[in-house]
Amino acid sequence: MNSKQIAGEKACEYIQDGMVVGLGTGSTAYYMIQKLGDRVAEGLNVTGVVTSKATEKLALERNIPLMDLNDVTEIDLTIDGADEVDAAFRGVKGGGGALLFEKLVAHASKKSIWVVGEDKVVETLGAFPLPVEVVPFGYKQVERQLEEKGYNPILRHHEDGSIYLTDSQNYILDLQMKAITNPEALNDWLNNLPGVVENGLFLNYASSIVIGFSDGSVEVRDK
């Protein structure tokens, strides 16, 4: 069992009967959803709210009941992965391209738990490219402004060379920053840039972090 599976299955223990649960996207969330599918088969009563088409497909395969985010007033608990997380519970997400839906679901949640392998815990955010979701119209204008700031944006592509499209049919510019010294200021600046839909900085969402280690141990850190 790898560290992601250990963390994902541990986080699933926080899901209680009757909950509305936000279901994250990515490799660690995959294991949580698989485990949740087992619990639903055993009689657990939950309703899931998905953060991507990929998660929706997986949840339906595991017979997890789903509702649209528009049809719930609030979410009891969201469990999701993260590409990086620091000691202040700030994170970078969006490596899987679902940052917009993930942030919408997280914002509607009373509590968010992130599940990560030990390699995702960092002292300073920024080594992982920061995803910025932009509308296709005029995206070169946004790209130019990011370049002027020295953020080295790279338009995300599929392996076949085609431009990557999010579930909302937007583009992603991945910023190669090495280190993000002031995440709050960068978040504000990006969100005020016309053409930017959302960015991958998640600064005030995680209330707990479940960290899986390669030796099979799990650590839970509460904010």
Image (cartoon, grey):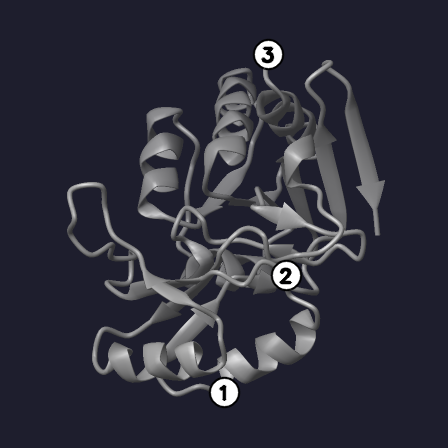
In this rendering, position of residue 36 left or right of residue 181:
left
User: SS for tag 2?
Assistant: loop
Task: Give the vertical position of 211 relative to 169 (above or below).
Answer: above
**Badge 3 is on which residue?**
1
**Badge 2 is on which residue?**
179
x and y, in percent, of residue 172 in the image: 34, 62
In this rendering, position of residue 203 left or right of residue 174:
right
**Badge 1 is on which residue?**
192
Q: Quadrant of the N terminus?
A: top right
**Residue at (20, 56) in percent of width and height:** 163
**Residue at (72, 33) in percent of width and height:** 211
| Mark 3 burial class by Cα count in 10 Å: few <14, some 14-19, many 20+ | few
**Residue at (50, 41) in percent of width and height:** 47
Marker disc for residue 27: none
| Mark 1 burial class by Cα count in 10 Å: few <14, some 14-19, many 20+ | few
Toward the viewer: 72 or 140? 140
Q: Amino acid at mark 3?
A: Met
